[in-house]
Amino acid sequence: MSEVTAGGRGRPWSLRTRLVVSAVLLIAVVCAVIGTVTTVAFRTYLYGQLDAQLGAVAMRATGPPLPDGERPPVGLPRKTPLDFVTGGGAPVGTVGALVGDDGTVTVAVASTQREPDGLGPTEDPLTAAQRDALASVARDGEPHTVELPDGGGYRVEYADGVRGSFLVGVPTRDVQDALRTLILVEVCVTGAGLLAAGIAGASIVGVALRPLRRVAATARRVSELPLHSGEVALHERVPDAEADPRTEVGQVGAALNMLLGHVGSALSARQESETRVRRFVADAGHELRTPLASIRGYAELTRRGRERNEVEATPGGRPGGRDAVPPDTRHALSRIESEAVRMTGLVEDLLLLARLDAGRPLAHESTDLPRLVVDAVSDARAAGPDHTWRLELPAEPVTVRADRERLHQVLVNLLANARTHTPPGTTVTARVRAGDPPAGPVLLEVEDDGPGIPEEFQRSVFERFARGDASRSRQAGGTGLGLAIAHAVVTAHGGTVGVRSVPGRTVFTVALPPARAGAGPAEEVPQDSQAGHRLITQP
C-alpha cells in the first residue's frame, strides 16, 4: 500500500493518501463484515419463515401423522389428493406430488394464477423433468432446496400422514428477491459511505497534517539557503505552535529546531574560522609584499652592480677583474629574482582572492567585451607564438557591466591556461556570443583542440591550487590559482563559469549578465577589432 504503479514505475504515496486509503479500507472491511452478518441473519430468518409455511402446507396435505406401523386409510373425504396446493395459506407456485407405495411420484401439480379473470389459483401439472427433480428429495421429513427445471428454486419437504405420502414445495422466489434487494441496498449504502468517508477523511487528514506541512516548509526553506560558503544567517525556525513536544508533530518540529540551532552554531563557527583565515591571508600578503620587493630589488641591484664593476675594473672592458662575480653567483641571483617574481604573483593572487571572498565591491562600468577579448588574445599571441590563435566575434557590439581590469584578468588566465597546458600547434579560439534572447547572458568561450581535461578532474578544476595530470601539469611555474581567480571574479560579477572537455576539444564558458539600458556608454571599439569577422593569427 506504500506504492502505486504509474506508467510502469513504482511511485510512493504521500502520508495523506496512505492515511485516507487506510481509513477507507478499514471502513470497507467493517461494512463488509456488517453486511455479511446482516445478510446471513436475514436469510436465516426468511428461510425459517418459509420452512414454517412449508410445514403448514405439508400438514394440510397429509393430515395428522400416522402411528408407527399403520397404513393411511383409504377413501378419506377430499376433492382431489392435491387440492391443498390451491387451498388457503398456500402461496401461488406451491407444488405438490403424491408418492405411491413404491416411492415413485404418481401425480404432481403446481398452483398458478388464473388468467385472465385472476379469481384464484389453479392447478397445472408438472413436467417429467420437474417430477424427477422432486423425486430426488430425501425422504427424511426435512426441508431441502431444489431447483426445478423452468420453475426456479423451491423448498421441498417429504410428509407422511393419514391422507397419504406427499412431496410438498413452496417457491423461494420471494426470499431470493428480498435477499437481492438487501444486498443491493447494502452495496449502495456502503459505496456512498466510503465516498463520504474518503472526502471527509481527506479533509480531516489535510487539516491534521497542516502542522507537519509547516515543518516541511521550514526544512525546505533551509535547504534552499546557500549554506556551502559565505556568511549565513540561519534564522529559520519551526513556529512554537508546531514545536510542542507533547504531540508527535511537535516532537519533529522541536527536533528540527534543535538541529537548526546546532547547524547555525556550526555555520557561525565556520564563518569565524574563514574570516580569520582570510584576514590572515590578507595581512600576510600585505606583509610579504614589502620584503619580496626588497629581495627582488637588492638581488637585481647586486647582480647589475657587480657586472658593471667588473666591466669597469678590467682593462679594455673585459671581465676577469678582481671584483668579478662568479657565474654560479650570477645564476643564484637570477634565480632569486625569478622566484621573487613568482612569489610576488602568488601573493597578489592570494590578496585578490581574499578581497573577493570578503565581498569587496568591484568597479563596474560599461565594458565592450569584443575589444577586451582582442587585447587579451593579442597579448596571448605574443606570449605563445607557437600556438594558433583565433577570434570569433559577433557582428554587433556587445557590452557588459563589469570591472574591466578584473574581467581582463579572467581572459588572461583562461588563455594562459590553454597556452600552458596544450602542446605547440594547438588552436585556441576566443569566442563572444550575444545573449539569446537579448536579455539573456553574454557568453564568452575559450576553446582549444588540445588533449583535454580528465573527467575526474573537471569537477575540481576551479578549486584553488588544483592541478591535473601530466597533460595539464604545471609547465610554466603556475600556482594553480588562475582558474580559481577566474571563477571568483566571474561569480563576483553575478555570472557563471564552466568547462566541457573531451579529448580534442576543451571549452571554458563564461556567462555574464548583459549591460542594462542606460547603464552608461561603452568604449568605442577600433575598426580593426570590430565584430563580424574572424581574426586568425598563425605562429
Image (cartoon, grey):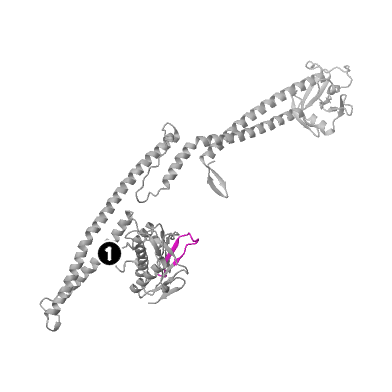
Give x and y (percent) for residue 106. 85, 27
Whether residue 210 sits left or right of residue 421 in the image: it is right
Q: Is residue 503 above or below residue 489?
A: below
Q: Is residue 370 visible to us here?
A: yes
Q: Quadrant of residue 196?
A: top right
Q: Is residue 264 above or below residue 33?
A: below
Give x and y (percent) for residue 384. 34, 73
- Most extreme residue toward the left is 322
Q: Which residue is mark 1?
A: 345
Is 364 covered by the magenta stretch?
Answer: no
Q: Which residues are magenta?
A: 432-450
| Front one among 438 and 385 | 438
Q: Quadrant of residue 149?
A: top right
Residue type, numbered disc 1: Gly
| Front one among 137 and 276 | 276
Is 438 covered by the magenta stretch?
Answer: yes
Q: Is residue 167 above or below residue 372?
A: above
